[in-house]
Image: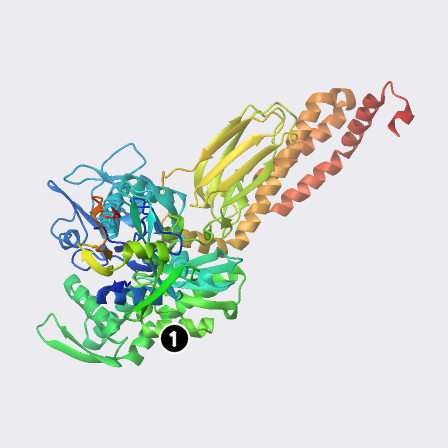
Amino acid sequence: MALLQIAEPGESAVPHEHKLAAGIDLGTTNSLVAAVRSGVAETLPDEEGRHLLPSVVRYTPEGVVVGEAARAAAAEDPHNTIASVKRLIGRGVEDLKTLGDRLPYEFVDTDSVVPRIKTVAGPVSAVEVSAEILKVLATRAEKTLGGPLTGVVITVPAYFDDAQRQATKDAAKLAGLHVFRLLNEPTAAAVAYGLDREAEGVHAVYDLGGGTFDVSILRLNKGVFEVMATGGDSALGGDDFDRAIAEWVMQQAGIGNEASPNLLRSLMDKARTAKEALAQRDAVEIEVALPDGRHWQGQLDRATMNRLIEPLIRKTISACRRTLRDAGVRPEEIEDVVMVGGSTRTLRVRELVGEFFATEPLVDIDPDKVVAIGAALQADVLAGNKPEDEMLLLDVIPLSLGIETMGGLVEKIIPRNTTIPVARAQEFTTFKDGQTAMAIHVVQGERELVADNRSLARFELRGIPPMVAGAARIRVTFSVDADGLLHVEAEELSQGVKASVEVKPSYGLTDEEIAGMLESSIEHAGEDMAARRLTEQRVEAARVVEALQSALAGDADELLDAAERRIVEQALQDLQQTAENATDSETIKRAIEQLEKSCEFYVERRMNSNIRKAMAGHKVDEFE
Amino acid sequence: MAITLSDAAAERIRKFLDGRGSGVGVRLGVKTSGCSGMAYVLEFVDELNDDDAVMEDKGVKIIVDEKSLVYLDGTELDYGKEGLNEGFKFNNPNVKDECGCGESFTV
C-alpha cells in the first residue's frame, strides 16, 4: 500500500503521477535536501537521521563515497577526497592557479579549459564531483517521497556568475536531475519565511556563514519577488569570530604566534565551543593544554566575547549599509530581516542587526536549513502542486555587463543589480570608412577600462556592407535568462546579418575577486573617470585625423595650394603627436580645437565645393 | 457510517493543518481513475461542498462527500513509515483488490 500525502484542495494527483519535487541547498561545506509533504516543507534526513550531508566526495578503487564517511577519510586520503568543490565549480584552469597553493589536489595537465583533479578513479571535474553530491541527495529524496523526482530547485549564491550557474546546471544534468530553476540563496530564505505571501514590502536577508557574509535586499511588489541588490564580504564569517576568541585566549594564556598548528587548531575548536555555549549561557570556562605541559584555565563571559567580535559584526553592518545604498533604500524601510547561516545564532549578531534595521530579525527557522526549505517550497510550486499562480522570483546580475568600444573603453549595456530576466539593446556604429567587420568583446565588471574588467567572450560580426564611418547601425542585444545565463547578439540593421554568443563555463571569478572588483571600482572611480576622458579624447582625435586624412586624399589637390596644404598637414601631425603623448584629456581637447581652427578655411572651402557640386544643374528654388 | 483516524494520523494531520495555517480539516475520498478502478483522495479542505458529510475523530474534522462515503465506510486512516518514506495509509475494509502499487483499488 503506497503512502499518501495530503494534497492542496483539488490538487490530488492521479495514481502514479505524483509531482514529486525537492529543493537542494548545494553548500560549500554541507548540503541539504528538502521537500514539501502534506503542505509542510522540511529538510529530509538520511537513514541515520542526519539532515546535513557534508559536501565531501571520496574516490576509491571500489567506488565513490559521499558525505560523513568521505569527510572522515579526508586526512588519511587527501588526494582522492574532494571537499569544498563549490569553490571550484565553473572555474577555469587559469582561476585555479590563484587557488592552487591552498588545494591539496593534483590537477591533470590538459589542454581543456575545464580543470580535472587526479584521483584513483581517474580524473574528475568539479561538475562531476558536484553531481555525486546531488545524486546522493536526490536518492534520499526519492526514497523519502516514494517515487522519482519530476524536478528540483537548486540554490546558488547571489554572486555566482554565468559560468558557475551553468556548471551547477550541468552537474544536475549529470546527476540525472531536471532543474526547474536555480534560485539565489537569499531569495530562497525569504520564501521559507513566506515573505512572498505578504502584499508588498522591502526585506533584507542577512547570511553569515562560517567563512562568508552575504546580504541581499529583496522587494516584493504585486506578488513579484525582486532582488534589488546584493553585497557582502566574501572573507568574513563565524570562523573569524572563533579566531578573535582564540587570539584572546592566546593572549591570556601567554601563547605566542609560534604555537604549533595542532595547538592552533585545538584553540579554534575551543573558541567555537565557547562561542556556541555563550548563545545559551553568560560565561564559560576554557581550559588549554600548553606546549610545556602546564594547563591554562580561564573564564570568558558574554560581554568579553561581544567586545572581541563586535568589530567583525560592525563590518557586516557596513556591508549592509552599502548594499542598502545600492538598492536606494533606507534601513528603516526594511520590514523584515531574515537570518541565514549558523553564525546568526550568536546573540550579539542578532542584536546589532536588529538595531541597524530597527526590526526584530526572523530567527524561527533553523538558519542552516532555511535556504533548502525555501528551495523546496519553490520546487513544489514549479512542479505544479499549488493552485495559486506560480510565483515568479526575480534575481539581479551581480556585475555590470557591457562591450568594449574604441580605445579599450567599456560601454555598459546592463548595469549591475539589474533584475533578470532582462534584455537590453544598444546601437553601435563603424569607426572607419568601408569597415565590414566588427569585433564584439563582452566584458563584465564596474571599471571604465576593459583591461580592469573581466573578459567573458569575444566574437565577430562580419558582412557589414561597406559604408562611410558612422553610417552603419549595429544593434547589440544582451539578454540574461532567469538562471542568469548571458546571450549576446549583434545585428547589422540594413542587411540583417547576425552573430551571437552564449557565455560558456570556460572560467569564473572567485567571490573574493568579485568583491575586489567592486571595491576597486569605488576606489578607482576618480582615476577611472580621468582615464575614460583621456581615452575618449584620444579616440576623438583619431577620428578627426582619420576624417581629415580621407578628405585630403579626396579633394586636397583641387582645393588647396601647396602652402595651405602644408598648414593642414602640419596641424594634423601636431594633433597626432599630442594625442599620443598627452597624459590628460584637456591637452588633447585643446589640440583638437587648435586643429579645427587652423583648418577652418579648408573645411569651409570643402563645404562650399560640395554644395556647388550638389546644386549644379538645379534651380535655387528647388532647394526651398 | 464512520471513518476513523489512528493516533499517529490524527497527530500528523493536526500538525500539517497547523503548519499550513488555514483549512477546516482533511478530505478523504475516492475518484474513478487509476489502474484498477478507484483512487484515493486526500486533501486539505478550505471550503465545504453541499454534499459533504463532516465527521470528527480525535479533534480532527474529517470531510467526505456522500458518494465516497459508500466506498470508505469503516476505513481507518493510519500514518506510518516504510524506510525513509512516510505517509498516510487507508485501511479500508471494502477493498476487494488493489493494484500492485496500492494507489488504486476495486470494491
Q: Chain of mark 1?
A: A
Q: Quadrant of residue A616?
A: top right
Q: Viewed as shown, does residue A145 lie left or right of A450? A: left
| Rendered position, B78 above or below A163 | below
Can you identify the residue that label 1 sits on? A351
Image quarter where the C terminus of chain A lies is top right
* Mark 1 closeness class: few <14, some 14–19, many ≥20 residues within 10 Å: some
Query: In the rendered image, is residue A375 in sight?
Result: yes
Q: Position of residue A193 (x, y in %)?
A: 39, 63
Going by the image, does A319 lie left or right of A365? right
Helix, strand or loop status at disc 1: helix
Judge by depth and name the residue closer to the eye, A501 or A262: A501
Q: Is residue A327 left or right of residue A178?
A: right
Look at the image and name its color scheme. rainbow
* Residue with the most extreme top position: A617
Q: Is residue A374 visible?
A: no
Pick whichever, A542 or A494, lies toward us: A494
Q: Position of residue A165 (x, y in %)?
A: 37, 45
Q: Foreground residue, A587 or A80? A: A80
Image location of residue A228, percent across then percent down: 50, 57
Residue B46 picture quarter = bottom left
Say which quarter of the image contains residue B80.
Answer: bottom left
Depicted B25 relative to depicted A111: above or below:
below
Identify the residue shown where x is 60% and y is 31%. A430
Q: Residue at x 9, y 72 (%)?
A: A292
Residue type at mark 1 is: Glu
Image x and y of residue A424, in percent: 55, 42
Residue at 17% in and 62% down: A261
